[in-house]
Amino acid sequence: MSINRRDWLRTSMLSGLGLAATTSAFCEPWLDTEASVSMVMPPKGGMMKARLSANENPYGPSPKALKAISEAASDGFLYPFSYAGQLRKMIAEQEGVAEEQILLAPGSGSLLTAAAMYYTYLKPGGSIISADPTYEQLMRAAVQHGAKWEKVPLTAGGYDHNLAEMEKRISDETNLVYVNNPNNPTGVTIDPVALRAFVDRVSVKKPVFVDEAYIHYTSDPKKFSVIENIRKGQNVLVARTFSKIYGMAGLRLGYLVGQPETLAAISKWGGGPGGLTMTTLRAGLACYTDEEFIKYSLAKGLEAREFLYETLKANGYTYLPSGTNFVLFPIRMKGDDFVSRMMEQGVSIRQWKFDGQYWCRVSLGTMPQMQAFAQGLKVIS
């Protein structure tokens, strides 16, 4: 039987993907790849039952994305610029902006770093204002290049962005205002009316960067997003990622929405189609408008979140209501001890300390993974 090279590669890829699908339940990865986090080792003499420390989506990539990857692999000798253009056009149409208002990159993290470098060197010695705690990649990159970091504590009790205080901190020395909505690690979503009003006022004075990595897990992504402010011509940037709802964390794809001249300037520091692979772009094109998978992925996440809420209540814990694929709750022992004891049960999680309290952040996994967390929590509580 004759078979050409392209067909052979596609057949091999599909076979490999099928094998991966059947074995993934038994071969949980253990390395925590989240930025600025030390490695999480598997329990001694045991196995990892649930990796709930990196906010990954265990239900992706979608079947359409996997099929696109298998078909794209044999085209790996080609530069994928035309597919980058197709994806930019698709995103622009979906968001109601011009193609020049979309900047692609290998994950939104690289765009956070590029923005940090651009604004730091644009005005050396200036500052970045953000909530505290929040996702830190942009600010850490800015500090490494000489910027100051003004941390504004979250509101008491509700642990929301203190927008009023952040606005008060703005001065001539401010380079950028960073907002993470929904916020990581708290999972709290900012009131959309308050946030848009904040952006309306602040963007006249200083650029505003809104990181919307988890926006798809909110009750209404369009309602909570500030892309509308960009359509109005305001000095605003919005970062999005394919790592969460689309389940493409390991494939690395994200984008920035903003004014064309700003994106052109930031692109000199990072981003653009040059760092994207043929397989990633084709997967992104396949899944970006895959409403069936998005609904499935979201429904499974919400199911896990409700299970986690009930588990915490049953064990006497409170929690912060989440608009993300993770939940943060206060714990009754030191954070490092909690992490270690859960790891002994084969479950990896994250811990924070703020407001005089230790906290645990649990990512949403499959139901067997959530049940493993529930069993581990019962043992150590």
Image: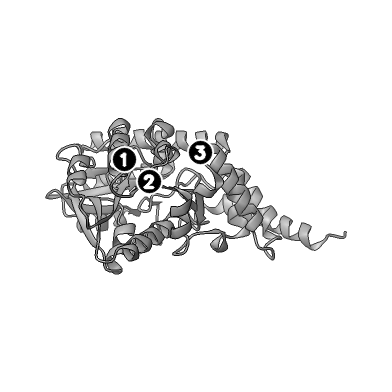
The picture places residue 60, in percent across and down from the top left corner, at 52, 46
Classify the position of the N terminus by image quarter: bottom right
Mark 2 and 3 residues: CB-CB less than 8 Å, in contact?
no
Classify the position of the C terminus by image quarter: top left
The picture places residue 245, in percent across and down from the top left corner, at 47, 43
Three-letter code for the amino acid on which mark 1 is drawn: Val
How would you rate the neighbour count of disc 2 (Cα within 10 Å): few for under 14, some for 14-19, many for 20 or more? many
Residue 160 visible somewhere in the drawing: yes
Residue nearest the viewer, comparing 219 with 130: 130
Establish if 294 lies above or below 85: above
- Spatial separation of the CA atoms under disc 3 and disc 1: 18 Å
Residue nearest the viewer, comparing 308 with 88: 88
The picture places residue 232, in percent across and down from the top left corner, at 42, 37
Mark 2 and 1 residues: CB-CB less than 8 Å, in contact?
yes
Left or right: 134, with 280 as reference point: left
- Spatial separation of the CA atoms under disc 2 and disc 1: 8 Å
| Residue identifier under label 1 | 199
Q: Residue at x 16, y 47 (%)?
A: 332
Colour setting: one colour
Badge 2 or badge 1: first in the primary sequence: 1
| Residue identifier under label 3 | 95
Residue nearest the viewer, comparing 132 with 11: 132
